[in-house]
Image: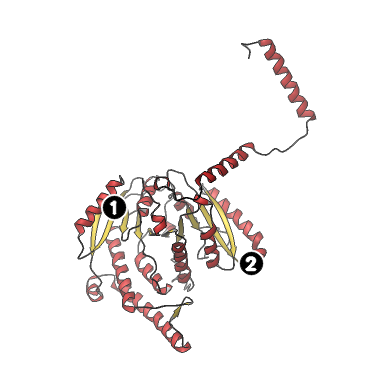
Amino acid sequence: MFLISWLFTVVSLALASLIYYYVSIKGKAGDWGDGFKSAYFQLALRSLRSLGAKQVHPKNWYPIPLIFCRPWGKLPENVPCHPKLADFANCMKKKGRGMSIFVNILDGDYHECAEDAKEACKQLDTYINYKNCEGVAEIVVATNMTEGFRGIVQTMGLGNLKPNIVVVRYPEIWRRENLKEIPTRFVGIINDCIVANKAVVIVKGLDEWPNEYQRQYGSIDLYWIVRDGGLMLLLSQLLLTKESFESCKIQVFCIAEEDSDAESLKADVKKFLYDLRLQAEVIVITIKSWDVEGGSQQDDSIEAFNDARKRVASYLEELKEAAKREGTPLMADGKAVVVDEQQVEKFLYTTLKLNTTILRYSRMAAVVLVSLPPPPINHPAYCYMEYMDLLVGNVQRLLMVLFTLLSCSQKSVT
């Protein structure tokens, strides 16, 4: 302006200063809001409409975890969430990008608990900000935990921003504190996620989960039992991007039976990893077919198996007595069940052998990931919890990953 005409520049600045001074003295004060927030809002709406609700291409798939903060309700009332859940949620983000949804459920009537829900949401939001986690807090009021969770998995999120992974901590306290309602709630959460096409990640050993400053060494071990579309590989790669796990290496353990072709299985898995451009060591482990008598002679952990078998037998005997007394079919968890006791023993033994294998090969691992089969149909929830207890026994950090067909079809680790 000065180069064009210094005279007009001085006059323009003088007039602008006079106008500014006049407005500041005589002008009417007003709150015009934040223009940037308005622009962000319009941009978010435009982006959401462009995303739509179509299936996401695998190259653009991002994990959006739904963090269930208090599924077992045993935290102090003034603690909105387990202190390490946000640390784990941060480990599930791709290159620092992503969003987590933290949810709590309040039991009661909505009209009576509306103010309590608002206060609980503020506490949870404060916790998220304190942990530097990119996420939002949601509080849902429902008549009970089961109905509240079913409403959440159906309605939470918009379009392609709906959560695709549900994260819960394993209820390690259920047997110690004799919380008999937890098995039904635990299996109910898993079955609801299967119906809603959500993947499930169950975290055992959350108290020992490292924060961003605690560097881990060793390996990240994956026990590939059933195909999961690459979800465990994705989680392991996300862990490697964090400073606490960047010094670890990935080992993939493939479980095979005695009569299977171990070398062929190893070659298939190596090719799969090569196609995905992933660096990982592949190890094939052969587990003997189910044989209780043979296992009792070789397995050092057979005492745990026998204890679980006795508890399950006692539980089933109680169910049979109740059904005989009331003249009804065998009932558990409010529905009819059909139990094959030999199959129950087979599940118990197979789970115990897997736990023994994990302790043999991965006792010093930084974290272990196991693909988790869904709960058997028509089996009581108590039996499934017994399987889980045998699986997680003496393992420090364990992530149990359960997948659904829809969630698997969308995943990519590249």
Which one is closest to the eye, mark 1 or mark 2? 2
Residue 298: x %, y % from top left: 22, 71
Q: Quadrant of residue 318?
A: bottom left
Q: What element carries label 2?
A: loop
Badge 1 or badge 2: first in the primary sequence: 2
Q: Quadrant of the C terminus?
A: top left
Q: Can residue 279 be seen here?
A: no
Q: Looking at the picture, does residue 344 appear above or below residue 395?
A: below
Q: Which of 315 and 147 is in front in this view?
A: 147
Q: What element carries label 1?
A: strand
User: Which residue in the protein does label 1 denote?
Assistant: 251
Q: Is 406 displayed left or right of 261 in the figure?
A: right
Q: Nearer the viewer, residue 218 or 181?
A: 181
Q: In which quarter of the image is residue 330?
A: bottom left
User: Mark 1, residues whose alpha carbon is within 10 Å: few (<14), some, or many (≥20)?
Assistant: many
Instruction: State the residue at coordinates (60%, 57%).
Output: 120
In this rendering, the count of numbered labels is 2
User: Mark 2, residues whose alpha carbon is within 10 Å: few (<14), some, or many (≥20)?
Assistant: few
Q: Distance between the residues labelled 1 and 2?
A: 49 Å
Residue 197: x %, y % from top left: 44, 59
- Residue type of the residue flagged with mark 1: Gln
Instruction: State the residue at coordinates (26%, 53%).
Output: 269
User: Which residue in the protein does label 2 denote?
Assistant: 109
In the image as oriented, which residue stretches furthest toward the right?
26
Whether pointer 1 and pointer 2 mark residues with C-beta atoms closer than 8 Å, the reply is: no
Q: In which quarter of the image is residue 400?
A: bottom left
Instruction: State the residue at coordinates (52%, 55%).
Output: 102
Q: Is 153 displayed left or right of 317 in the figure?
A: right
- Residue type of the residue flagged with mark 2: Asp
